[in-house]
Amino acid sequence: MSLELNKQKAINVTIVGTIVDVVLSAGKIIVGTVFFSHSLIIDGIHSLSDLLTDLFVLIVANFSHDHPDDEHPYGHGRFETLGTIVIGIVLVVVAIFLAIDNISLFLAGTVKEIPKWPTLVVAFISIISKEWLFRYSLKIGEEIKSQLIIANAWHSRSDALSSILVFVGLIFSLYGYKEVDLVVAVILSLFIGKVGWDFILNSLHELLDTSVSEEMREEIKAIIKSIDGVKGMHNLRSRKIGDKAILDVNIEVAPNITVSEGHEIATWTAETVIKAFDSVYDVTVHTDVEDDRETGQEYVVYESKLLPLRTEVLEKLEKIIGTAEYSKIDEVKIHYRYKRIKLSLLYLGDKLPEKKVILDAIESDDLFEEVVFYKSL
């Protein structure tokens, strides 16, 4: 699904939520004030916070689904993460103030009026509308894999659940238990705060580059190991950016294949994983001819022994076998493996040189593991 289509769906569902929240917040606050329900007023403020976050989501959605650019080569998914944190902070702050206010009223015993029946009607309408909005938003959020839309959907579900509490509390209040209305208001405040805190915590984990789930890691490993040419793999790492994940992995291939074949195996690895998971945005594949980890460690940072590159290897080879023999060599292939070097020597002329002499000279050097001779056609 294209980024443009995802963006439009995110905007559409948020606009619908905005309209619902405008009507509900106004209705709850007005009816709660006129007919003496503190819990309905708080529920209205909760809906008002929904409205504010809807507007914020509209702004963030315009950025988070944009294509990668020079300044944001991995896309704009972090905007969603930051947006979810803001939603969480708004909920926690609102919850704290509402809880303090209603606890003060309860302790002071200043509640005199009993809520009237119209508050029940508004609470019931709120339950139905917010539950519908939750299901609709969650469906779209999962469809476009947007954590921000999913978070906003659960914000709507919290409003539906809070309206159920208000409805039950109002029934008790109508029968003369007017303190129940305040108790419900405090419970709602705590519930709102818990939802907000969960949003903040989950988003902070994402900002700290939390990896994908262990189940998904195992699926990725199985897919990579099934690719033709992959002899093994190690150092699979991942980090989440918004609703997407970025991976990097080391694959092990046969040591005697060409560079271009190794590159093609790496390309197949990346493309296969990306096609298998909609949530995977990019895969960086490092091609090895061995598992170069330290034993028993998945992620290692250690001081490695750097082997000499071609120019130094050729100079060393000429010094060992002599200039006369070196001049007969048409091509040298260098294979690095297990911190040693294997050489494949392609010779010109009618016959190969004296192998034993060359082998004794080369293998006397601890750097070289093996030498293979080939005759030029």
Image (cartoon, grey):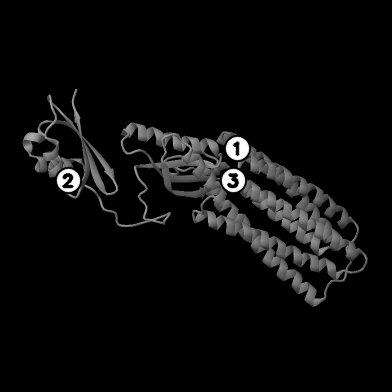
Please tell me which residue is depicted at 69% across the width and 49% down the height of the picture. 153
Q: Residues within 10 Å of mark 3 (few under 14, many from 20)?
A: some
Which residue is farthest front?
A: 356
What amino acid type should be assigned to the residue bearing mark 2? Glu
Q: Residue at x 64, y 63 (%)?
A: 93
Label 3: which residue?
59
Quadrant where the C terminus sits is top left
Mark nearer the viewer, 2 or 1: 2
Give the amino acid type for the residue marked by disc 3 in the picture.
Ile
Residue 182 can be seen, yes or no: yes
Mark 2 burial class by Cα count in 10 Å: few <14, some 14-19, many 20+ = some
Residue 38 position by quadrant: bottom right
> Residue at the spot x=67%, y=67% of the render?
96
Quadrant of the image containing the N terminus: top right
Q: CA distance from mark 2 to mark 1?
A: 62 Å
Using the rendered image of the protein, determine whether residue 19 is visible from the camera's viewpoint. no
State whether residue 325 is above or below residue 297: above
- Residue 223, given in percent of the width and then of the height, sits at 51, 40
**Residue sitting at 78 percent across and 76 percent down?**
107
Please tell me in which quadrant of the rendered image residue 58 appears. top right
Determine whether label 1 and label 3 are within 8 Å by CB.
no
Q: Amino acid at mark 1?
A: Asn
